[in-house]
Amino acid sequence: MYQLISAALLGVFFFHGFSSSEKAPNYSFMHQATRAPKVAYYDYIIIGGGTAGCPLAATLSQNYNVLLLERGGSPYGNENITNLSEFGVPLSDLSPSSPSQDGVINARARVLGGGSCLNAGFYTRAATTYVNTVGWDGRLVNESYVWVEKKVAFEPMVREWQSAVRDGLVEVGIGPYNGFTYDHLDGTKIGGTIFDSDGTRHTAADLLEYANPSRLTVLLHASAHKILFKSKGKMRPLAHGVVFRDASGRKHKAYLKRGEMNEIIVSAGALGSPQILMLSGLGPSQQLKAHNISVVLDQPMIGQGMSDNPMNAIFVPSPVPVEICLIQVVGITPFGTYIEAASGKNFLGSNPEDKSTFRGGFILEKIMGPLSTGHLELRTRNPNDNPNVTFNYFKHPEDLRRCVHGIKVIERVIESKSFTKFRFNSLSFPALLNLTASAPVNLLPRHNNVSESLEQFCKGTVMTIWHYHGGCQVGKVVDQDYKVLGVDALRVIGGSTFNYSPGANPQATVMMLGRYDTTILYVLFYMTIFD
């Protein structure tokens, strides 16, 4: 029975979904929240129009009336987002809207399309072993990746700097060389990119081209403040509405229509999803009471298990000009690290002086895992205030060991024959380490001569690669179908549910999951009916 239902639904949702209804950026269903009615009713309400929320909304709208709430604006027409050469501007923001914890400068997306509007654009699938471990249906996963890739993924044009890093990785033994592929394969490969051949970024917001425009409402600058629950006469609290405010501060309410499948889905990212659950009364009761929040459900695991893959980069000045290029090559090592590279002046922020004198690039390592975890706590009851988050970088000694391995691989790549053109022979590797450590890569105290200890270099120059995850993990906060434990009609989808970040970059998998989980939802519902 399952196979018959699954096959039928795949035909309905995947093939029907390929028919493009509207083209970005002129979506007829996209409005400022100030235009929203005071009260409205929908089959599904999605909080967060990010990397998971957009594919969720597009798929659900094929058959249901859907509301998508996005606290930020549209990415279209903003060159700091769409233009590859301006990559560093939004990420160099140190304002209160960009949280900094553990001495590491972080950034949190506030735009339709979420993190896919701010990141380095690398597109790569999760490993087959990851898919099997979390229990996903491999066939449906692949179909969902293809659905995403038709809109946002491209093969990059690999030029000199990236080619030198690629050849250097293979030369030092990070093999085999797997060529261009979206698949996660040990060794060295060229991955995909969400930047097209003109250098224009394509984001999760572009997946809304799949949507049924007559069934979808996207509200911009709509800040969700609270999920509403019914408890009277219910065995468990039932999510049935959302309170949100528009840019002028006016309050609106959106409610679920009556229906067997109707749900509220939270896809507000690893920082936003646990935050909105806590603000709604789900979370550690002691913390909620400290903020005078009425406890709907004491759930101590919400906000726990927060992880961020630590990144350490080495700046390599070049005697020759280098191309402006973000991540294209990845070396997937047997030591538990990823080696990647970026070059040019596009990640230096908005200071024109820096850009005029900069020539060179970075080779970076990010550890797989990590094993170090932290937690998230509310700072205030205002959803626009970032929560306090602690990732505890390198608290677990294995994470530090992996970082040291990664730095040693980078050293061998820089000193390889393949990379000769892009290095000054007069600059030793210890000199490069000290040069890198002297830059304001984070807010931690500076140390003299960090090259004496690679462990100290790792700890002193740690940065984020923006792959936050945790806070609403499967088996602790949500079940295998991403339904929130202990309540009804509420689901969380996105990076906050991960126990382990998939692949060298999770964005492909988060977009895939927005598509995949929606289809699984239909399969489970129809199985219940036929049973």
Image: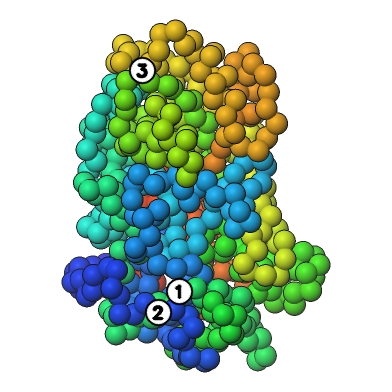
Front one among 470 and 105: 105
Residue 441, quarter of picture:
top right
In the rendered image, which residue does mark 3 sit on? 319
Judged from this view, the residue extending furthest toward the top is: 426
Above or below, comparing residue 151 to residue 250 in the picture: above
Quadrant containing the N terminus in the rendered view: bottom left
Q: Residue visible at 45% across and 17% down?
A: 411
Residue 246, by quadrant, is bottom right
Q: Is residue 332 visible?
A: no
Q: Can residue 158 be seen in this view?
A: yes
Left or right for 497, reference 297:
left
Label 1 neighbour load within 10 Å: few <14, some 14-19, many 20+: many
Q: Which of marks 3 and 2 is in front?
A: 3
Q: Position of residue 495 (x, y in %)?
A: 49, 55
Label 3 CA crowd tier, 10 Å (few <14, some 14–19, many 20+): few
Q: What residue type is labelled 1?
A: Leu
Vertical comparison of 37 with 141: above or below: below
Type of amino acid at the residue the image marks with label 3: Pro
Residue 363: x and y in percent read 43, 27
Q: Which amino acid does label 2 sit on?
A: His
Mark 2 sits on what residue?
31
Please tell me which residue is depicted at 30% across the width and 32% down the height of the picture.
323
Q: Distance between the residues labelled 1 and 2?
A: 6 Å
Name the residue carrying label 1.
220
Say whether marks 1 and 2 touch (CB < 8 Å): yes
Q: Give me the disc on residue 472.
A: none
Q: Where is residue 389 in the image (x, y as percent from the top left)?
A: 66, 52
Task: Write down the quadrant of residue 450 in the picture.
Answer: top right
